[in-house]
Image: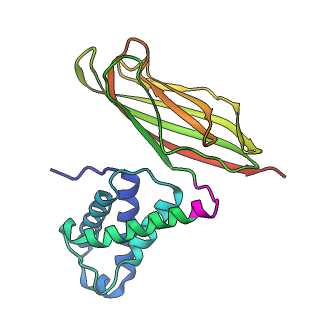
Amino acid sequence: MSYVPKNLDVFTAAFAGLMAGLVTDRQTLSALPDAEFSSISSTWAQAFDTVWGGQNTTAFDLLAIESLSSQSVSGRFPRSKNAADYVPLATSIANLILTGDSGFVSAGIIVPPTSVSGTTPGLAANETVELTPFIVLTDGNAYLLEYDACIASFDLDLGHDVVSNIIRNKVALRKAGGVTTIANAGSTVQTGEAGTGLFTITMSVGVAPDRVELVFATGAGKTARCNISANINLSAVPYI
C-alpha cells in the first residue's frame, strides 16, 4: 500500500529539499541514476512526515524543513529506501525546527500558521470545534485572511461513507492596541455532497489570547464524525 502523508505540506517540503540536496551534491549526482533521486527523496519525506506526526505548520516550519532537508545531504547521508533508516536524522531536524518556533515566541515575533485543523467526535448533533493552532495577528497591520477548508466526514444519521465539503472565504481584518477587529466578514462559498449543507465555519475574535477564531459546526440536527483541515493565506500591510 502506498504511503499517505499525515501533512502533505510537510511531506512536499521534505521531498523537495532532499531532492535539491541530492542534485547539488556533485558526487551523488554522478553516482545515482535519475530514477533514484525521486525514490530516495520520497523515502526521506515519508520518514520526516511520520516524525512530524501531522502537526500544523507555520511558514517558518516549511521553509526550515525544505532548507535543512537539502543541507542534510553529505557523504554520510544514508541514501536508503528504508524510511526507518532516516528516523534518527529526521527527529533531530524536527526538534531543531521546533526549537526555532520557540525562539520566535521568545522574541515576541508571531508567525501565523499555514493551516489549521480540528475534529468532531460525532456523538451528538451540532457539535463545534475551534480550528487550531490559534491565528494570532501582529499589532499595527491591516490583513486579508483567506481560508480554504476541506471537511471529510462520516454521516451517522445516514450511515453512509465519507463525504466531503469545501468552505472558502476572504476576510478583511486589522489589529491595533492588542485588539483584533473583523472589518469585513466576506462572503462564504460552500460546495459539497448531500448531507453536508448544514456544515459551517464561523469567524470571530477570541480572547486570552486575542486571536482570530475559526469555529466549525456540524449544524442543528446533523450528527457527523468530521475531520477538518483549512489552508490559511494571510497577507499583512502595515499602517503608515
The residue closer to the viewer here, 55 or 115, is 55
Q: Residue furthest front?
A: 208
The magenta span reads 104-111
Count up the numbered dots. Answer: 0
Question: Magenta stretch containing residue 147, yes or no?
Answer: no
Estimate the x, y position of residue 186 in percent, counting from the top left. 64, 29
Camera-nearest residue between 41 and 96: 96
The extreme right residue here reads 240
Corner quadrant of residue 182: top right
Please tell me which residue is depicted at 63% across the width and 64% down the height of the picture.
107
- In the image shown, does 187 or 153 lie closer to the viewer? 153
Colour pattern of the rendering: rainbow
Q: In which image quadrant can residue 92 be found?
A: bottom left
SS assignment for the magenta stretch, majority: loop
Q: Residue furthest top?
A: 221
Against 25, is 181 above or below?
A: above
